[in-house]
Image (tube, coloured by chain):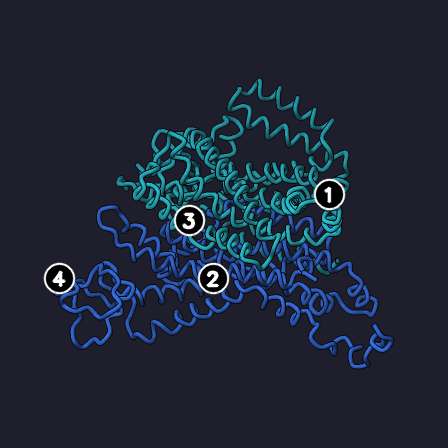
């Protein structure tokens, strides 16, 4: 144990030294402090963890609320919820919050460092090349010399003014104005896609798993695998050519009516449906050999009831734990699908901002992605405990 | 059952002497039942062989063998005669016996057949190397975390959780951009970028496996007999995770190939790959004049390869996972 800890600590130190040499010692220092702070929480006694957890929650809520309700109301609500969290939330959730909030700050820092390491600047394509004009631009958009100062300026803007900064590539818009209208678009598309993926995946996976190595298995899995056997731009293009150009049932591209939702949602859903089908198939095969299934059959229940009432539960459990990480990808949209179907969603900004070095937009998308993935992981944990009594005991 | 058959045959007592009942021969027997997985294996071998040998056998360079007069020809099985095409310039000169127009040509008149096979070499190579890299990192990381457990495990898994929270698109794109000046034409950045993203899942799975294995009796026995940690991990635990590692490696290859095709779509791909050909093909599909073969053939090869790999991975899982074992 001690030997392994020394090896891992040495490795971490080497990584920090590498960061120090390549990026700068200030940046390495921030990683050291941030990492140590998050890691130290593992040794906190429960009482201290409760206090730190609820304080961090209040802090996070304050940053979030002040943009909507103003600083004064924000402080009051944040402290109130923090106090409620201190009193009522289980220790496990405090530990989760204690990991999530500092991680988000560290995430902003990591992304900033990565961005500054990539060559080029947000103004690389600008026509005006005089030094003064560039400096004026950099000042206007608060683009600093190095990653550390940019991080400081960004955090100051976020904490004191509640703004995520100005987008460089879309003139005259702040990051919130750019991303917040796109989020509901991606969310509604994602929700429909999630429903399609879960239904399609479960139906195909259970059908395959009830009778493995039969034609029902092969045909169901063959259909399900389409989603992860072709790039999504090929799938999307095929759907587009067939349903919009040949049959002319659905509009080619755009956003507005429910008809615009169908093709992009299917394209988005197919890869997830494939993973869900695979998990459901495995879960079903496993569960069908359990003794209680034999009992159910011996009782004389029809095969339909056996599958729907008993096997379904076994098939769903692995799917539920997959949904946490999958949800973040599905709800934040996809660059390919939004480009193909001209959907004004959020996914395009992940790629556009990184390619255009639009620093504030990159950080904005990263924050939203991280928030969604953490929230869904938490939700999934609770859903899992609710579905599986064995896990409930451990909580 | 007779009394005699209950007596253990002396030849069967040793751990390695029982014929036909080892994990691997058992798995092979079950894998053979899964016709789709076997078909996948065969198909994969065919695709790999044709990609590896095809471009060499034609003797045509997929990049430089241009001929503007033969641009955007549709596929043709036979050698084109003057009657086959509107423009007689499309006919090959006499010194070339075969036209290799089976998949048509691209806008520079290059044989699409050769390009698709050559693109396959790079796609498969990326899938293989990035997967090997991610499996190597993931196995080392996951087995350290899982074997030692405790606070060390918690810290190491939090690092993984943290890295999961960074959108993988950023990681991949930013790593690609970092290398864009120094290593423009080499596939190295893409190996690093995709390996960096994919190792997380392997680490998580390995850690879970090792965590359950380390508390089992045979590990205890080894420890009691004075085996060192290194010996226990390498001789007793890791061999038991081999099945899982093989399954996930098989399933990671298609994921990596798909990720590369996404990067090609964005414009950051690793040169001539199936992903690049398919996304180029996508841009020349329009209702007025569609060069459909430019999208169709790379897509068919992609789909065949990925279908095969996915079915092989699933078949291996069925065969190796004791929980899905049918009596």
Across and down, in percent, residue A155 comes to 52, 34
**Vertically, is B14 above or below A206?**
below
Q: Secondary structure at mark 3?
A: helix
Determine which of the numbered discs, if any, sits on residue A391 in the image: 1
- Chain B, chosen colour in render: blue
User: Which is nearer the eye, B176 or B284?
Assistant: B284
Question: Could you say which quadrant of the image residue B231 lies in?
Answer: bottom right
Q: Secondary structure at mark 4?
A: loop
Q: Secondary structure at mark 2?
A: helix
- Gap in angstroms between the C-alphas marked 2 and 4: 41 Å
User: Which is nearer the eye, B172 or A34?
Assistant: B172
- Gap in angstroms between the C-alphas marked 4 and 3: 36 Å
- Gap in angstroms between the C-alphas marked 3 and 1: 36 Å
What residue would you read off at disc 2? B127
Question: Which-is-in-front pick, marks 1 and 4?
Answer: 4
Across and down, in percent, residue B253 comes to 50, 60
- Work out whether mark 3 precedes mark 1 in sequence or the reverse, and give the earlier one: 3
What residue would you read off at disc 4? B87
Across and down, in percent, residue A303 comes to 65, 47
- Work out whether mark 2 precedes mark 4 in sequence or the reverse, and give the earlier one: 4
In what quadrant of the picture does the C terminus of chain A appear?
A: top right
| Residue A138 in view, yes or no | no
Chain name for mark 2: B
Chain name for mark 1: A
- Gap in angstroms between the C-alphas marked 2 and 3: 18 Å
Which residue is painted at 54% across and 63% down in the image?
B312
Which residue is painted at 60% across and 53% down in the image?
A209
How crowded is the residue under tag 1: few (<14 C-alpha within 10 Å), some, or many (20+)? few
Determine which of the numbered discs, if any, sits on residue A232 in the image: 3
Furthest residue toward bottom? B11
Across and down, in percent, residue B168 comes to 49, 48
Question: Which-is-in-front pick, marks 2 and 4?
Answer: 4
């Amino acid at each position: 144990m001690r030997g392994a800890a020394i090896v891992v600590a040495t490795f971490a130190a080497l990584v920090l030294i590498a960061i120090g040499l390549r990026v700068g010692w200030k940046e390495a220092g921030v990683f050291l402090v941030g990492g140590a702070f998050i890691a130290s929480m593992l040794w906190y006694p429960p009482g201290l963890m409760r206090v730190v957890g609820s304080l961090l929650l209040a802090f996070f809520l304050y940053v979030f609320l002040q943009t909507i309700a103003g600083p004064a109301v924000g402080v009051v609500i944040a402290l109130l919820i923090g106090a409620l969290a201190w009193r009522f939330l289980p220790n496990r959730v405090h530990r989760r919050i204690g990991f999530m909030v500092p991680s988000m700050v560290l995430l902003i820092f990591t992304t900033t460092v990565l961005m500054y390491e990539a060559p080029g600047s947000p103004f690389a394509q600008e026509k005006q090349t005089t030094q003064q004009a560039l400096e004026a631009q950099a000042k206007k958009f608060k683009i600093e010399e190095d990653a550390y100062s940019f991080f400081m300026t960004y955090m100051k803007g976020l904490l004191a003014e509640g703004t995520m900064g100005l987008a460089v590539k879309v003139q005259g818009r702040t990051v919130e104005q750019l991303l917040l209208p796109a989020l509901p678009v991606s969310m509604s598309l994602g929700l429909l896609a999630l429903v399609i993926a879960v239904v399609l995946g479960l139906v195909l996976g259970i059908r395959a798993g009830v009778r493995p190595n039969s034609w029902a298995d092969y045909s169901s899995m063959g259909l399900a695998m389409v989603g992860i056997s072709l790039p999504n731009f090929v799938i999307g293009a095929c759907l587009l050519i067939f349903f919009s150009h040949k049959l002319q049932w659905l509009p080619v591209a755009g956003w507005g009516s429910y008809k615009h939702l169908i093709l992009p949602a299917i394209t988005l859903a197919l890869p997830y449906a494939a993973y869900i089908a695979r998990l459901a198939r495995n879960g079903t095969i496993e569960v069908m050999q359990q003794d209680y299934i034999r009992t159910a059959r011996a009782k004389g229940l029809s095969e339909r009831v056996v599958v729907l009432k008993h096997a379904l539960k076994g098939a769903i459990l692995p799917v539920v734990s997959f949904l946490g990480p999958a949800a973040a990808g599905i709800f934040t949209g996809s660059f390919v699908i939004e480009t193909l179907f001209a959907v004004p969603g959020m996914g395009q900004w992940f790629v556009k901002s990184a390619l255009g070095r639009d620093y504030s937009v990159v950080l904005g998308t990263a924050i939203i992605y991280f928030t969604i993935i953490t929230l869904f992981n938490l939700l999934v944990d609770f859903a899992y405990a609710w579905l599986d009594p064995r896990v409930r005991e451990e909580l | 059952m007779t009394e005699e058959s209950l007596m253990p045959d002396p030849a069967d007592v040793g751990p390695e002497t029982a014929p036909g009942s080892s994990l691997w021969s058992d798995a092979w027997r079950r894998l053979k039942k899964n016709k789709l997985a076997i078909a996948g294996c065969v198909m994969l071998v065919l695709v790999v062989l044709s990609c590896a040998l095809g471009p060499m056998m034609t003797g045509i360079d997929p990049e430089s063998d241009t001929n503007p007069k033969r641009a955007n020809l549709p596929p043709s099985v036979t050698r084109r005669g003057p009657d086959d095409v509107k423009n007689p310039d499309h006919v090959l000169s006499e010194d070339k016996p075969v036209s290799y127009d089976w998949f048509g040509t691209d806008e520079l008149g290059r044989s699409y057949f050769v390009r698709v096979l050559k693109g396959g070499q790079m796609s498969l190579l990326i899938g293989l190397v990035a997967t090997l890299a991610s499996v190597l990192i993931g196995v080392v990381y996951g087995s350290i975390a899982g074997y030692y457990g405790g606070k060390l495990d918690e810290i190491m898994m939090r690092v993984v959780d943290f890295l999961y929270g960074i959108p993988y698109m950023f990681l991949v794109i930013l790593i690609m951009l970092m290398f864009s000046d120094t290593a423009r034409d080499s596939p190295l950045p893409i190996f690093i970028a995709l390996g960096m993203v994919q190792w997380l899942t392997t680490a998580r799975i390995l850690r879970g496996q090792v965590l359950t294995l380390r508390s089992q009796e045979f590990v205890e026995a080894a420890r009691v007999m004075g085996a060192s940690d290194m010996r226990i991990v390498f001789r007793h635990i890791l061999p038991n995770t081999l099945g899982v590692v093989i399954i996930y490696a098989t399933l990671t290859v298609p994921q990596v190939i798909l990720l590369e095709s996404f990067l090609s779509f964005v414009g950051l791909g690793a040169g001539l790959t199936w992903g690049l050909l398919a996304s180029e093909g996508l841009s020349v599909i329009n209702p007025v004049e569609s060069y459909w073969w430019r999208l169709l053939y790379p897509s068919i090869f992609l789909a065949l390869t990925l279908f095969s790999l996915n079915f092989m991975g699933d078949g291996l899982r069925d065969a190796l996972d004791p929980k899905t074992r049918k009596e």
